[in-house]
Image (cartoon, rainbow, N blue to C red):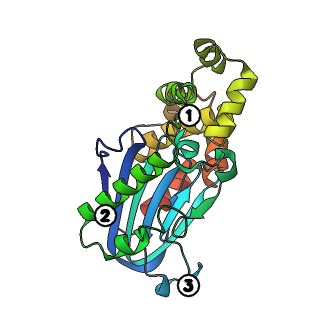
Amino acid sequence: MKTQAIIPHPSVAAYVSNIVVIENNNIYREAVLPLIANSYPSITFQITDTGLLLNSPKNMDSLVLYGQNTKPIELHTRGYVIIIAYFLYPHMLKALFGIDAKELTNISIDLNFSEPARSISLKEQLLNAMTLGKRLQLMNNYVLKLADRYKPGINNTIAFATQAIQKSKGLISLTQVQGELFVTERTLQRLFEFHVGVSPKTFSRICQFHSALQQLSQNQFTEMTDVAFESGYADQSHLIRTFKEFTNYTPLEYLKSASEFPR
C-alpha cells in the first residue's frame, strides 16, 4: 500500500488542512480500512473493485463527504484501490456546504448528485482522469466552487477555538478558550455544534485521542504508560477505555489490526 501526504495547493489552503492519497493494486483479499476520529471532516474520492467485495454493499459511493466521526467507519476494499482524502479544517462544514455540522456527525453523504459536483460531472471527470495530478486539480476546483457558494462563510471565533484545542492536543482548558474569545460556555457550545458538529469537550477528547494514536502508529513509545502520560491521560486504563470508545479496539489490538492491512 502506497500512502502519500500532500500539502494542499495555496488556492485551497484556507479550507483544506491536508491531503492523504492511498493507492494499492495488490489487494487480493478483501480488507477493511478503518476511518478513525481525527477531528477533521473530509471530502473523499474512492475507487475499489466493488464487484469483488463479499462482505459489504456493492454500490459504494465514489465521492463522499464525511462529517466529524466519533465512531469508527469501516471502508471495505479489494482489487485496485485509490483513496484521495481532502481533510477540511474542523470549522469548514458550514462554510463550504451550508449545512449545520451537527447534522453530519457520524454520517457520510454521497456528493455525486449534489451541486456543484453534479453540474460539472465531477465523479465522471475523476474516474476518467489518468493522473493523480489531474485528480487533485479537479478536487481543488471543486473546493473553490464550494467556497464561492457561501461567501464569506468562515467564522473566525470557531476557527480560533478549534485551532487552539488542536494545537494543545486537546489539553487546553475550555474555560481558557472562552476567556480568550470573550464568550460564554453556552455560546461556545452552540458555535461548535453549528460549525464543527460536536461539543467543545468531545472535540478536545478527539484531539487528545488522535495525539495518542499518532504516537502509537509511529512507534514513539516504549511502554503504554508513556503514551498515556504524554497524551495527558490519568493512567493507562483511561487511555485504553478511550481507545476502545473511538476504535472498538484496545491500543495493542488496533496496532495488530493495522499491521495486517495489505501492503
Question: In the rendered view, would you say 55 is above or below 209?
Answer: below
Residue highlighted by disc 2: 135
Measured as percent of width and height from the top left, residue 46 is found at 43, 68
Measured as percent of width and height from the top left, residue 143 is found at 42, 52
Residue that appears at 32% across and 76% down: 128
Quadrant position of residue 127: bottom left
Q: Which mark is residue 59?
A: none
Q: CA distance from mark 2 to mark 1?
A: 33 Å
Q: Which comes before the other along the chain, label 2 or label 1?
A: 2
Residue that appears at 29% across and 46% down: 9
Residue highlighted by disc 1: 208
Question: In the rendered view, would you say 221 is above or below 18?
Answer: above
Secondary structure at numbered mark 2: helix
Identify residue type, mark 3: Leu
Question: In the rendered view, would you say 15 is above or below 58?
Answer: above
Residue highlighted by disc 3: 54
Visible residue check, residue 237: no
Question: In the rendered view, would you say 140 is above or below 201?
Answer: below
Compared across the picture, whether 7 is left or right of 109 comes to left
Measured as percent of width and height from the top left, residue 166 is found at 50, 31
Q: CA distance from mark 3 to mark 2?
A: 28 Å
As rendered, which of 167 and 171 lies closer to the eye? 167
Viewer-nearest of discs 2 and 1: 2
Q: Which comes before the other along the chain, label 3 or label 2?
A: 3
